Image (cartoon, rainbow, N blue to C red):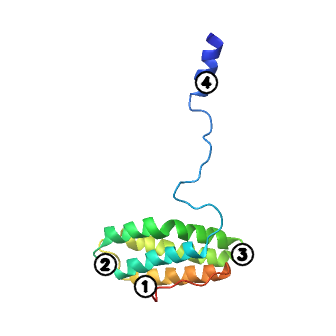
Amino acid sequence: MLAVLALVAAGCNGDAEPEPTTPPSQTIGPVSQAEADATVEGLCEMIGLGRGERDAVNAIFYDESHAGIHRIAADVETDDRAAAALLLERKLLVEQGLLAEPISESFRSDVHDLVDAISAAVKVLGFRAPDCSG
């Protein structure tokens, strides 16, 4: 009986590696046209907000676009590492702009550059390039 309790206790000591899981909000599989469109749609919504609306812009970025940007970069990396790297660099500029209060003067331009990088990346994946034109 003591041996069984020792084994149970050993299994509950936290030393075991947890099973990796995918966050519930992340889609499994390759990026789709719909996901690329939704990612850019969030960015376009951010462009429409004022520089003084930092909290709202941050919420839109992280809730609607951030994960999609990473997924697009990961998918395109195998075909075009330069496109993936540019996409992640542009994302970083937007993230840095979101830290400023108020949002940086170059923010709208940085977001447009990010949209352009996404468009170039999804073309590599064979999709129609989404944009903020309508």
What label sits on residue 79 in the rendered view?
Answer: 3
In the rendered view, does 57 fall on the left or right side of 18? left
> What residue type is disc 3 on?
Asp
Q: Position of residue 98 (x, y in %)?
A: 38, 71
In the rendered view, does 52 fall on the left or right side of 45? left
Q: Position of residue 97 (x, y in %)?
A: 40, 74
Q: Which residue corresponds to mark 2?
A: 51
**Label 4 – label 1 distance at C-alpha:** 56 Å
Question: Residue 104 lies in what quarter of the image?
Answer: bottom left
> What residue type is disc 4 on?
Ala
> What residue type is disc 1 on?
Ser
Q: Nearer the viewer, residue 22 or 94?
A: 22
- Marks 2,4: beta carbons within 8 A: no
Mark 2 lies on a secondary structure that is: loop
Q: Which residue corresponds to mark 4?
A: 10
User: In the image, what residue occupies the spot 49% across and 71% down?
Assistant: 92
User: In the image, what residue occupies the spot 27% across and 75% down?
Assistant: 52
User: In the image, what residue occupies the spot 49% across and 78% down?
Assistant: 40
Q: Which residue corresponds to mark 1?
A: 109
- Marks 3,2: beta carbons within 8 A: no
Q: Residues within 10 Å of mark 4 (few under 14, many from 20)?
A: few
Mark 1 lies on a secondary structure that is: helix
Tell which circle, 2 or 4, labels the residue nearer the N-terminal end.
4
Q: Residues within 10 Å of mark 2 (few under 14, many from 20)?
A: some
Tell which circle, 3 or 4, labels the residue nearer the N-terminal end.
4
Tell which circle, 4 or 1, labels the residue nearer the N-terminal end.
4
> What residue type is disc 2 on?
Arg
